[in-house]
Amino acid sequence: MLGLVGILLLIALFVPREYRVERSVVIAQPRDSVFSYVKYLRNQNDYSKWASMDPAMKKEFRGTDAQPGFVSAWKSEKSDVGSGEQTIKSIDGIGRIEYDLHFIEPFDAHADSWMLTEAEGTGTKVRWGIQGRMAYPSNLMLLCYDMDASIGNDLSTGLENLRKKMEGGR
């Protein structure tokens, strides 16, 4: 048994500790309209897949939305939702919003997240991403858990919901 643990710890030394996932969608609306909507963190409740995973989830908001320092907190009894906080770190004009994600339950972790809007033709390309770091030896989980597929699918669902909302259900 100790030999197996030793082998796993050795393998973990060579497994990447960082992950980065990003997805995008093109929305047939002007960039300023899209950015004016997504800069309000509270609006994620209308399009984020995670916000819809538990209708009984308790939510709390602190600060002034669409401003650095605004916090959106959640607490759920469902283990796949857990509890945590998302804080706006910065907002750059009509281009980029950066967030700090603090997962509290079922595990304590931090990740960086962002939304980026770019003009694309007469519409807007929205990129939504998350990146984080897993400490050794927890990084061993990255061998078994496909962060890109799992988180990427959730980001894609949220972006598609956002597109439908911004385009009036099209």
Image (tube, rainbow, N blue to C red):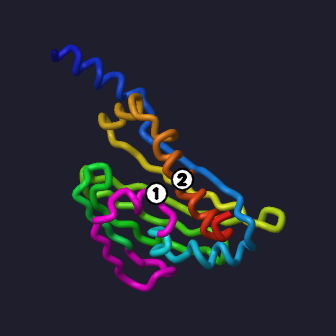
Residue 92 numbered mark, or none:
none
State left or right for residue 36 relative to residue 125: left
State left or right for residue 15 relative to residue 120: left
- Name which residue lies at 46% across and 81% down: 65
State left or right for residue 73 relative to residue 117: left
Q: Name the image quarter holding the N terminus.
A: top left
Dot 2 or dot 1: first in sequence order is 1
Instruction: Determine contact: label 2, label 1, CB under 8 Å.
Output: yes
Q: Identify residue for label 2.
A: 157
Q: Which residues are magenta?
A: 46-71
- Point out residue 8 in the picture as x, y percentages from the top left corner: 29, 22
Label 2 and label 1: CA atoms lie apart by 6 Å
- Point out residue 59 in the picture as x, y percentages from the top left corner: 31, 72
Q: Secondary structure at mark 2?
A: helix
- Point out residue 36 in the picture as x, y percentages from the top left corner: 62, 79
Residue 49 numbered mark, or none:
1
Instruction: Tell me which secondary structure the magenta stretch mostly adopts.
Output: loop
Question: Residue reaching furthest bottom?
Answer: 64
Q: For residue 75, which quarter of the picture? A: bottom left
Q: What amino acid is found at the position of numbered circle 2 in the picture? A: Thr
Q: What amino acid is found at the position of numbered circle 1 in the picture? A: Lys
Question: Residue reaching furthest right?
Answer: 121
Magenta residue check for 96 = no
Magenta residue check for 61 = yes
Q: For residue 100, which quarter of the picture? A: bottom left
42 over 17 or under it: above or below: below
Q: Name the image quarter holding the C terminus.
A: bottom right
- Point out residue 154 in the picture as x, y percentages from the top left corner: 49, 50
Pointer 1 local density, CA inside 10 Å: few below 14, some 14–19, many at least 20: some
Residue in front for this viewpoint, 113 or 145: 145
- Name which residue lies at 41% across and 57% down: 50
